[in-house]
Amino acid sequence: MLECASIEEVHDCIDRIDDQNVRLIAERHRKEEIIQRVRGRADWNGIDPPITERIYRAMRWLGELDT
């Protein structure tokens, strides 16, 4: 937990949190774009898009455990 000695430090901490939130939102947006592309490719190849999405999300989740 951060302890701030002044209002300026509080503002700096809030700014850092805002920056982190924006980065996380952008990362999530990119992941969702990838999921939509994977679903489209699955459909084009005659594979069930929802099942393909679940498999892809599981593979990504497992990959994130290695990092």
Image (cartoon, rainbow, N blue to C red):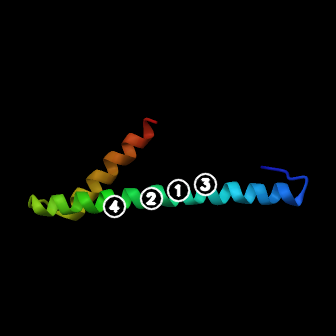
Q: Residue at x 33, y 50 (%)?
A: 58
Q: CA distance from mark 4 to mark 1?
A: 14 Å
Q: Residue at x 83, y 54 (%)?
A: 9
Q: Secondary structure at mark 2?
A: helix
Residue 38 image point, x, y percent = 24, 57
User: In this figure, which residue is indicated by the disc labeled 2?
Assistant: 28
Q: CA distance from mark 4 to mark 2?
A: 9 Å
User: In this figure, which residue is indicated by the disc labeled 1?
Assistant: 24
Q: Residue at x 16, y 59 (%)?
A: 42
Question: Looking at the picture, which amino acid does disc 4 mark?
Answer: Glu
User: In this figure, which residue is indicated by the disc labeled 4?
Assistant: 33
**Residues at circles 2 and 1 in contact by the CB criterion of under 8 Å:** yes
Q: Earlier in the sequence, mark 2 or mark 3?
A: 3
Q: Which mark is residue 14?
A: none
Q: CA distance from mark 1 to mark 3?
A: 6 Å
**Residues at circles 4 and 1 in contact by the CB criterion of under 8 Å:** no
Q: Earlier in the sequence, mark 4 or mark 1?
A: 1
Q: Secondary structure at mark 1?
A: helix
Residue 10 image point, x, y percent = 81, 58
Asked whether, in this view, residue 10 is left or right of residue 14, the answer is right
Residue 2 image point, x, y percent = 80, 50
Number of numbered labels in the structure image: 4
Q: Which mark is residue 20?
A: 3
Q: CA distance from mark 2 to mark 1?
A: 6 Å
Q: Earlier in the sequence, mark 4 or mark 3?
A: 3
Q: Earlier in the sequence, mark 4 or mark 2?
A: 2
Front residue of 57/7: it is 7
Q: Secondary structure at mark 4?
A: helix
**Residues at circles 1 and 3 in contact by the CB criterion of under 8 Å:** yes
Residue neighbourhood size for the residue with mark 4, other residues' Cα within 10 Å, grouped as few (<14), some (14–19), many (≥20): few
